[in-house]
Amino acid sequence: MAQKTLDVELILFDILDDIFKYLSLKDLYQVALVCKSWNNTASKEISRRSDIENFILPITRTKDNSQLSMCHLTDAVRSFPRLVLLFSDGKSPPCDDIEDICVYQCKCMERKTNFINIAAQGIAVNDTQIVGQDNVEVGITIPYPNKINKLKIDYFLPEDEVLLIHKAQNSLESYVKDAYKDLVTSEEDHNCFIFFYSQSCLYTENCQRNSYIRKFTADLLTCIKQRHSVKTFTLWGGEISSIITDFMGRDGILASSAFYLRLSGPGVKSWSLVIDSNAPNSEVKTRFEHLKKQLSVNRTTMALAMVPSKRDEPFEQLISKVSMFRTAFPGIPLTTIFTGEEFFQIGFNSTNTEDPDPVLEHENSYSFLIFTTK
């Protein structure tokens, strides 16, 4: 009788294990409350997941006390995120609480999550405009590293005060070396670098600080290029309107000058490409076709684009700038960040391994990144 009971329990666990594979993160948290055995099975399922995901999520305002209207991050994702990149057009409705962008999501997470909110001139997911006035933004979640995903996450946030000290002492080079050490903590066969820095001197009087952020970023890019073969890394990003971060070990939500991220290890594969905005369609098509031959795509594959644009440019005109990418890669979700036409773009053609010294900073160019988890 005891053997039959044990067999039934094992069958039940197998059934639960199979069912839990299809549940959202939110549902897994709920079923974990049923009993100890369900909690164990749900916890194992959460620990197995290693997807880098993208989502569209309403921004929840902290002044909104209606629990029914609150949209939790776990409603939208399958994996518990260590890091969330949020993209918005910076035009969300006014709120009494300056921390309204991320604070609710942070309070709701059962484990600590880092948030980076990137504000740009415009955002699109595929052919859909992401409108801040409608309380909507788009995000990408990057999971906690585990034995399965073999994903390594490193980042560096330059501090304005430290930057100014190095400026006064004419020792910016040493701070660049410190940044590189924090960003590249181990040697990996593949590295995906994502760089953002805020070019806010167009909107403030603090132009001098911003010029140093630009120089610091350029020097850090040079450092990476000198120490890494072009076969071992990809690069994407550029200048954006503003950056707000909420990081573990830091004092609340802060405005930041820059954010530098490295994803590495066998758990991630990526490809980067830069195309001049004035390139003829025939050249663009050829470049995309060449890139397509290099890709290994699965259900986790997604793409990012950094595209310069004029202020108040119609959305139909904006989205047409990435139409050829959408045609070439119809099955890959694309998040496009539209920045000011005077802003720089960061990236290079990672499939062109014959160029040992590629240009990493560009003007009037479209920068693309395709990445996938394995």
Image (cartoon, grey):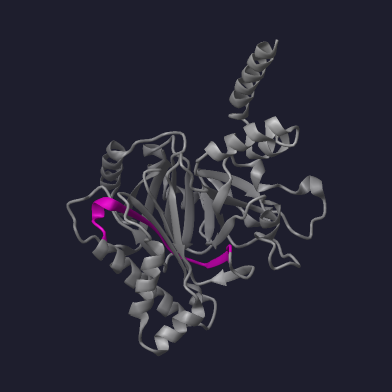
Q: In which quadrant is the N terminus drawn?
A: top right
Q: Is residue 139 shown to the viewer in this render?
A: no
The quadrant the C terminus occupies is top left
Q: Is residue 230 magenta?
A: yes
Outermost residue on the bottom side: it is 168
Residue at 26% over, 42% down: 286
Q: Judge left or right: residue 247 versus residue 157.
A: right
Name which residue lies at 62% across and 29% down.
20
Query: Image height check: is 203 above or below 54?
Result: below
Q: Is residue 344 something one can see in this rendering? A: yes
Question: In this view of the protein, which residue sits in the foreground, 221 or 121?
Answer: 221
Residue 352 on image: x %, y %: 22, 50
* Predominant SS along the magenta part: strand
Check the image and report above or below for 356 versus 325: below
Please give the name of the residue rendered at 36% of the width and 67% of the height, measured from the top-left corner: 180
Q: Position of residue 327 (x, y in %)?
A: 39, 38
In front: 23, or 72? 23
**In the image, farthest residue toward the front:** 2
214 falls in the magenta region: no
In the image, the segment drawn in magenta is 228-248
Total number of numbered discs in the rendering: 0
Q: Nearer the viewer, residue 94 or 111?
A: 111
- Residue 251 location, quadrant: bottom right
The one of 245 and 17 positioned closer to us in this rendering: 17
* Residue at 45% over, 86% down: 165
Q: Is residue 15 left or right of residue 61?
A: left
Q: Position of residue 205 (x, y in %)?
A: 53, 83
x then y, percent, for residue 45: 58, 34
Which residue in the rendered view is the most extreme toward the left?
A: 354
